[in-house]
Amino acid sequence: MHLPDELYKRMLQLLHDIKVEIDQYRQDDVHVLRAYLYEALMLLNRAYQNLISMEEGNKEAGGTHISKFIELVGADMREHHSVRYYADKLCITPNYLNEIVNSAMGMSAKQYNCI
């Protein structure tokens, strides 16, 4: 999953704050760490739910192709790195795959494959 820049920066800051709290840990600070962890998990869950809803809303624009693309990359990324390979597996053109991945995830299919 690719996080938007603003959310990515917020997550980095949150993780930094968690590290600071851990480094200064005191017995009474358990609730602070729990709150930070809860915030991080909720932000990631919200981003994931937005991604899923975007895919469901874009079924006509290739949402099912995106789901299958993500699945294929997860299974084959060590052996196959070309967008053409995944497009061929999905019976679509590499340009169309790149276009739908970019519109749904904010990155090219090649970038997603390299993550």
Image (cartoon, grey):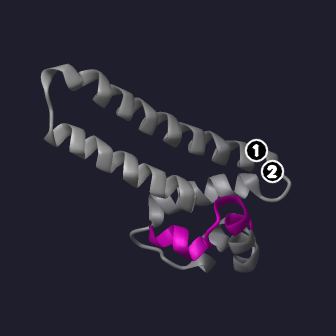
Is 79 displayed left or right of 110 in the figure?
Answer: left
- Type of residue at label 2? Lys
Q: Give how far across and how far down residue 63 sits, in percent.
A: 74, 53
Tell me whether circle 2 and circle 1 mark residues in contact (CB < 8 Å).
yes
How many numbered marks have been drawn onto this rendered protein structure? 2
Q: Quadrant of residue 25?
A: top left
Instruction: Determine whether the residue tagged by mark 2 lies in a helix, strand or loop.
Output: loop
Q: Camera-side residue: 54 or 85?
A: 54
Is 76 colored magenta in this rendering?
no
Is 103 colored magenta in this rendering?
yes
* Tag shown at residue 56: 1
Is 13 displayed left or right of 94 in the figure?
Answer: left
Q: Residue at x 80, y 46 (%)?
A: 57
Q: Camera-side residue: 89 or 114?
A: 114
Q: Camera-side residue: 77 or 5?
A: 5
Q: Residue at x 60, y 77 (%)?
A: 83
Q: Give how far across and how far down residue 5 sits, in percent.
A: 55, 62
Magenta stretch, main secondary structure class: helix
Distance from Cα at disc 2 to Cα at disc 1: 5 Å
Q: Give how far across and how far down residue 24 sits, in percent.
A: 15, 38
Crowd tier of the residue under label 2, counting other residues whose Cα lies within 10 Å: few below 14, some 14–19, many 20 or above: few
Q: Residue at x 22, y 25 (%)?
A: 29
List the residue tagged with mark 2: 59
Q: Quadrant of residue 108?
A: bottom right
Instruction: Determine whether the residue tagged by mark 1 lies in a helix, strand or loop.
Output: helix
State the extent of the magenta-drawn residues as a range: 100-115
Q: Residue at x 48, y 56 (%)?
A: 8
